[in-house]
Amino acid sequence: MSSYVVVGASRGLGFEYLKQLSENPENVVVGLVRNVQATKEKVAAEINRPNVHIFYTDLNDYKTLPGAVEETSKVSGGKLDVLIANAAVGGDHFDQTLSQLGSDPGKLEKDLTDCFRLNAVAQAHAVNAFMPLVLLGKAKKVIMMTTGMADVDLVRKYDIWMAVGYCASKAALNMIIAKFSAEYREKGVLFLGISPGVVDTSATDTDGSKDPTNPALSALGAKLLEYEPGWKGAITTEESIKKVLSVTEKASVEDGNAGDFLSHFGNKKWV
Ligand SMILES: NC(=O)c1ccc[n+]([C@@H]2O[C@H](COP(=O)([O-])OP(=O)(O)OC[C@H]3O[C@@H](n4cnc5c(N)ncnc54)[C@H](OP(=O)(O)O)[C@@H]3O)[C@@H](O)[C@H]2O)c1
């Protein structure tokens, strides 16, 4: 039996984690969400397994974390094998460059601050809150969802100008992952940042198929095609999480993955 906490499990990849991890009835799978009632109803309708538990957390308020840790501890036997930090925000200005954002300094400040607060700072709070349980767990893994768009070389080589706040905050998250790893590797805890590929969720439309009139989305799709001419567009949540789980299940401190930043292919190929 393994225990998992998925932070930000109401929809998209987080919900798919709940589905796939609960397939093994021995697993205890906890989803942390802002909208408990709606998520419970969705779980009942689409998963309906007794090993899925939904508790409240709003990452905008770190004071909600101790309650979630307490609830988790009750169903997981006072320990946790794998923490999955999945929640994120994309910012409101995907289609603006830094200088366009800067034409209204307040807008630039808000976009960057909103993204950093949730995608970097709140993630650190969530990890700190759950660490006592993780240290008592067997697997001792902290998996943090990041993005290939936070790969500076990718941005540099293909001039990926869009999604400034999102990319910069995920790059900060990558450093937070490395810093946590530096602190906990000797205690046997694996911290791993993983990019799930471009996945068809509410957060993405990068192949432009849903909104072909959005030039920034089409531009990103074109850049990704230049990066990988064989790219076929967004994959499903099911395919993404299957690949992600296969990478994260194999990854270990012993094999040199501590603090690493990998794709769903287990390497640095992002799509
Ligand atoms: N989809 C992709 O192609 C892609 C690519 C690269 C990386 N990723 C990463 O993969 C992860 C999941 O992405 P996704 O596409 O599934 O995103 P999504 O569909 O936008 O879902 C985001 C999740 O985060 C939760 N969340 C946001 N703010 C929260 C808060 N304050 N407290 C608690 N939960 C909060 C949302 O809950 P609510 O329902 O309450 O808003 C939702 O469950 C993210 O970290 C994302 O950056 C995704």
Image (cartoon, grey):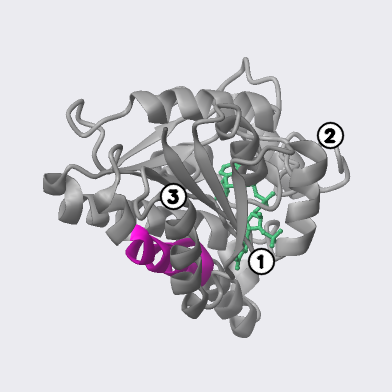
Estimate the x, y position of residue 158 in percent, counting from the top left: 52, 37
| 126 and 258: which is toward the camera | 126
Q: Nearer the viewer, residue 23 or 257?
A: 23
Residue 34: which numbered mark, if any?
A: 1
Residue 268 visible here? no
Q: Nearer the viewer, mark 1 or mark 3?
A: 3
Q: CA distance from mark 2 to mark 1?
A: 29 Å
Up/down of 188 relative to 235, above or below? below
The residue under the point 11% across, 46% down is 186
Mark 1 lies on a secondary structure that is: loop
The vertical placement of 226 against 41, above or below, is above
Q: Nearer the viewer, mark 3 or mark 2?
A: 3
What amino acid type is highlighted by mark number 2? Ser
Q: Percent position (x, y) of residue 113?
A: 52, 75
| Residue topped by disc 3 | 76
Q: Nearer the viewer, mark 2 or mark 1?
A: 1
What residue is at 58 percent from the left and 68 percent from the top? 99
The quarter holding residue 59 reads bottom right
Tag 2, which secondary structure? Answer: loop
**Majority secondary structure of the magenta segment?**
helix
Instruction: Magenta stretch: give its range.
Output: 116-130
Label annotation for residue 11: none
Circle 2 is placed at which residue position? 209
Which residue ends up furthest to the top in the rendered image?
Answer: 230
Judged left or right of residue 261, residue 52 is right
Answer with mark 3 or mark 2, whichever residue precedes in sequence.
3
Is residue 40 a member of the stretch shown in magenta? Answer: no
Please indicate whether residue 76 sits to the left or right of residue 88 in the image: left
**Residue 83 horizontal side relative to residue 231, left or right:** left
Amino acid type at mark 1: Arg
